[in-house]
Image: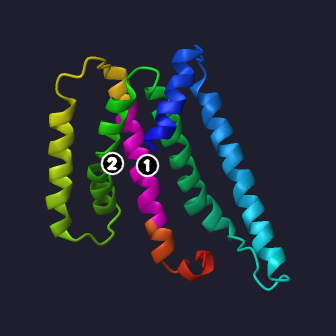
Amino acid sequence: LSTMKLAVKWVFVEYAFAFPKFVTVLHFASGFAVCAAVLWKRSSASSGEVKIPVPTASELFFVITPIAMAASISIGANNMALGFSSVAFTEIVGSTTCVFTVGTVLLMGLPFDAWLLIPTIAVAMGCAVSTAGEVNFSAFGMILCFASNAFRSIKVTLQQKLMTGESKDKFDPC
């Protein structure tokens, strides 16, 4: 992931490419094409035995669409943050996603093992120490990184809820 961020940042800086949202759109368009190809191949290779799962309207609007929106906002905010902060800084702040995820899991009422707070606090402390003295600090870049973390944790938590809830068997990829 950090190699990808370095490549994106290099394009932004080296070629003065000031369109992080365009990069995000291309990211999702290529992801859609690959996923569609995999689903089509999986369905055709099994002579139609494996059906592509079709979500109900409520699953689509209340579960899958929020997951997609959270993923889009997360990646978009992270790409925009690269225009204001260094790759190292965005990676360090991105490492604190676990802190956001713990909060999101607790807010959504999902089960959480309290022993996981120990490594979560260790990660948060390590990130705080490693960002001290950052030369390229940008408050707006930090806000975008935190927004990216928040939406990434929402996406992960909603995915957990989808894959462990009553629709688990329907959307199980295996």
Residue 164 position, x and y percent, is: 46, 76
Q: Considering only vertical position in the picture, is 49 above or below 60?
A: below
In the picture, measured across the screen, residue 158 lies left or right of residue 141, that is right
| Location of residue 117 (image quadrant) | bottom left
Q: At 79% across and 86% down in the image, what residue appears?
A: 49
Whether pointer 2 and pointer 1 mark residues with C-beta atoms closer than 8 Å, the reply is yes
Residue 99 position, x and y percent, is: 26, 51
Residue 130 position, x and y percent, is: 19, 34
Q: Considering only vertical position in the picture, is 93 above or below 61?
A: above
Q: Main secondary structure of the magenta part?
A: helix
Q: At 36% across and 33% down in the image, what residue appears?
A: 90
Q: Which mark is residue 97?
A: 2
**Residues drawn in magenta:** 144-159
Q: Amino acid at mark 2?
A: Thr
Q: Which mark is residue 38?
A: none
* Residue where numbered disc 1 is placed: 152
Residue 26 position, x and y percent, is: 68, 37
Looking at the image, which is closer to me, 16 or 113? 16
Q: Secondary structure at mark 2?
A: helix
Q: Residue furthest toward the top?
A: 16
